[in-house]
Image (cartoon, coloured by chain):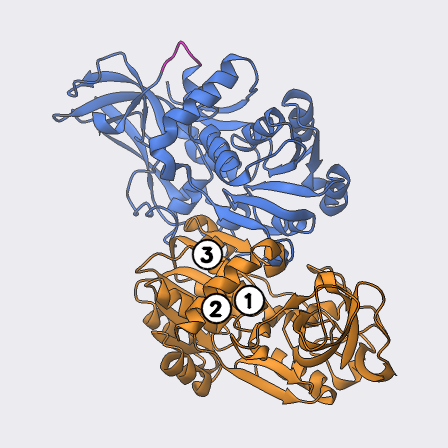
Chain colours: A orange, B blue
Amino acid sequence: MNNRRWVLASRPQGLPKPENFRLEEVSAGTPKDGEVLVKNLWLSLDPYMRGRMSEAKSYAKSVELGELMVGQTVGEVLESKHKGFAAGDKVLTGLGWQLYGCQPGAELFKVDAARAPLSYYLGLLGMPGMTAYFGMKDIGEPKAGDTVVVSAASGAVGSVVGQLAKLAGCRAVGIAGGKAKCDYVVKELGFDACVDYKAGNLYRDLKQACAQGVDVYFENVGGETLDTVFKLVNMNARVIVCGLISDYNAAEPYGVKMFRAILVNRMKVQGMLVFDRKERFGEALQALGGYYAQGKLKYRESVVQGIENAPQGLIDLLQGRNFGKQLVKLA
Amino acid sequence: MNNRRWVLASRPQGLPKPENFRLEEVSAGTPKDGEVLVKNLWLSLDPYMRGRMSEAKSYAKSVELGELMVGQTVGEVLESKHKGFAAGDKVLTGLGWQLYGCQPGAELFKVDAARAPLSYYLGLLGMPGMTAYFGMKDIGEPKAGDTVVVSAASGAVGSVVGQLAKLAGCRAVGIAGGKAKCDYVVKELGFDACVDYKAGNLYRDLKQACAQGVDVYFENVGGETLDTVFKLVNMNARVIVCGLISDYNAAEPYGVKMFRAILVNRMKVQGMLVFDRKERFGEALQALGGYYAQGKLKYRESVVQGIENAPQGLIDLLQGRNFGKQLVKLA
């Protein structure tokens, strides 16, 4: 059976370009003992993928030149040589940017198509949703009445952060790019306010939206946004450092000028990666799935059609052109 | 009775100059009901005082122009109108840069001259020692085998941090300026290593001294030192942000380039101020006093003679010219 897959052709400088990727046709292979052959249905595109394209140290090893681009997918089992899976099962995989692939059954998770649309296991009920859940619970520790600010508020992680903040009795304030995204964050997701950083007055607008200061900041972007929020934090503020997307394509890292706010306000600033909490994924799925079933979590997807458009989907995502969780529909 | 005191004459730009201070002769005053008249014996000089001379927001309000310079002293009670104190008692005060002063008894702490030299209550057994104690216990959480790095290692806080690290079974690595300080940190205080940042190869030398990476960093200086240590941190490293002395005199704040290390290594970076933990000072005094009585904490002082030399003492301290805890002997 023929497989199509994207490999890393060259390392990007700054924003990736289409020529950094190469589409290959190869055999899909056959599963060995303990393995499962999967037909991928959905591929998740995420900002962390930019990091894997670089040689610089990050939280996981780089993709080598000529190697398959990494990523999570949801797919259907075609053939199983693992006793836990049978043809027709729907699974969450780490098979990356390809139409078919074999993976050990021990590394797959079954997902329940009756509970939520399959693609949701890559977003609301997947890593992005769990990132929001653990970041808020373990680091943000929001108390009723707190003001919670989240950047990239219309994205897969940010949209869940703000809705969890509302469920905890907090004031939720988003930061997003453009009026359409800000309207969505307030009118559809139910945030109290959303500031458009592209309007050019982030400090003034954010100060107005956070009249009581900022108690929790969920950071997805970094750079000047981070420095601006740090000017508005309250004593004992908590900051979840989940992403620094503005740095990923920069040739030189941004110099954070407001580091002193950590001392002055006795802040706690902590990095987090959802994969560190694998043993608690069940807890997160239960909590998020419960809210979703009760209609308390809204969610939006941005879908690119066909594997051939995956590179452009990632490039758009890194520029904030997506609207909601970015996916590629593979079949 | 005549009193002499230093007031803030003008706000410094960058490093303070002698003309930013003015020496005044005023009456010592007499204690009101509930107050105590104290003759100051020792004045503590500390980096935080630079912050109080600015108008910029810090963790406490600024000293106004013409107002007394703030600071802690140890003194002797001359006259008491508070039932808890009698003439001759030795007390820890917040009377600032002056020879005499009246303060409510409720704000004073009695100190025990039999337990340790009086000046030690401004250092090893005072705010600096307690800063080291709480920072390590509450944020650093050192485990046996960890590598603990502390900047300004020969100073009042840093010297205690490294000794507490050794008592916890850690590798203690200091950063200090000049060979004499580094020799003192290793040979007298018992650190495993001390890197001289003035030698010009901080990254290389620190990497060599921390072959297993850095698990805990106790930050007193900030700036390039911080960026350098952040290149060497291990997964889940903890950083106590206690001081950023390199920023205090800078016209523009330093831009921290390695902020991304917080994300990549899932670090916890937390600001602390000892005064937030007033209700636990007894705990700290008991722990530090116990180690001191057992000969397990070594300590050094740098003494300026006479109140007239206090401004120069602070200026020297801010440039790292002191060696150990900086004090002014007032009587």
How would you rate the neighbour count of disc 1 (Cα within 10 Å): few for under 14, some for 14-19, many for 20 or more?
many
Q: Nearer the viewer, mark 2 or mark 3?
A: 2
Q: Position of residue B325 (x, y in %)?
A: 51, 27
How would you rate the neighbour count of disc 3 (Cα within 10 Å): few for under 14, some for 14-19, many for 20 or more?
few
Q: Residue at x 45, y 87 (%)?
A: A180
Q: Please check whether the numbered discs 2 and 1 fall on a single chain.
A: yes
Give the residue type that dot 1 points to: Gly
Q: Nearer the viewer, mark 2 or mark 1?
A: 2
Q: Please check whether the numbered discs 2 and 3 fall on a single chain.
A: yes
Which sits earlier in the primary sequence, circle 2 or circle 3? 3
Q: Nearer the viewer, residue B318 or A33?
A: A33
- Start and end of the magenta stretch? B112-116
Give the residue type that dot 3 points to: Lys
* In the displayed structure image, the side of residue A289 where residue B219 appears, left or right: right
Please say if the residues under marks 1 and 3 sit with CB atoms less than 8 Å apart: no
Q: Position of residue A45 (x, y in %)?
A: 65, 77
- Helix, strand or loop at label 3? It is helix
| Residue of label 1 | A222
Q: Give me the disc on residue A289.
A: 2
Q: Is residue A265 magenta?
A: no
Dot 3 falls on which chain?
A
| Residue of label 3 | A137
